[in-house]
Amino acid sequence: RTVAAGALKTGAHVIVFDPARFKDWNDFAHCAELVDAANPAVLADGAARMMTIYHNRTAALAEAGARNIGEMARPPQRIVVVLCEFGAQCEQARADGVMGDIETPLLQLARKAAAAGIHLVLEDQAVERWPRALSANVAGTAIGRMPLYAAQACGFVARRGMTTETLERGQFWFGGQLLRTPHMQPELRALLASVPAPRRL
């Protein structure tokens, strides 16, 4: 939610694929595109649509002679795609036989789409149920209540007795640094009050 709120405040379009009926995303209902992903086929369809957007943007970059959207005179809106409980979504997708339809486009997006202004946020407590190639193409972030082995896979290094259990609300580990943001829950409504409603992609 911290990342999604920050993305919205900087003008990005945020899409949240959530298999849990948006119980943690109610504050975003007016300003983000919320997609019910309880059925893995919905995520597969969404991944295919994001690939279409990526290909269209790549063509626009080539036409503009730009390497990334930051070099374009009139850049398109950045898109931040949040995939909630990603490991659980992968397990259900495998059971339903649609994992290939999800894995292939998401891997391409993770590898190449940032230059086109498309960014993935995969939310989970552990990465062992993720496709291996995909977990190798994302940067991990450690937050509290996360198994230590999973945090270490994200680069977390315990210092002076600090563990994931001792991280305070709003603290997280990213890129070898301990960072702090406001605790989102009490701040969200005020932060998002001025964010306009999204157009659906």
Image: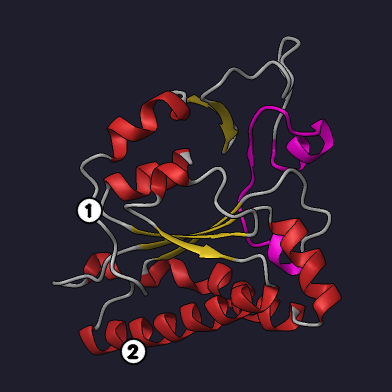
| Front residue of this view, candidates 167 and 43 | 43
Q: Is residue 47 magenta?
A: no
Q: Report x, y in % for residue 39.
A: 68, 72
Dots 2 and 1: beta carbons under 8 Å? no
Q: Identity of the amino acid at label 1?
A: Pro
Residue, disc 2: 59
| Front residue of this view, candidates 17 and 148 | 17
Q: At 43% from the left edge and 80% from the top edge, which residue is drawn?
A: 54
Residue, disc 1: 196
Q: Report x, y in % for residue 62.
A: 30, 87
Question: Relative to 110, does residue 153 appear above or below in the rendering?
Answer: above
On the image, which quarter does residue 67 sit in?
Answer: bottom left
Question: Relative to 9, does residue 110 appear above or below in the rendering?
Answer: below
Q: Is residue 149 magenta?
A: yes
Query: Is tag 2's residue or tag 1's residue first in the polypeptide sequence?
Result: 2
For the residues marked 2 and 1, what is the alpha-carbon distance in whole angstroms? 28 Å
Badge 2: few (under 14), some or many (20 or more) residues near its Cα, within 10 Å?
Answer: few
Q: At 39% from the left edge and 51% from the top edge, which residue is drawn?
A: 29
Q: At 57% from the left edge and 81% from the top edge, which residue is drawn?
A: 45
- Extent of the magenta region: 131-155
> Left or right of 134: which side holds 173?
left
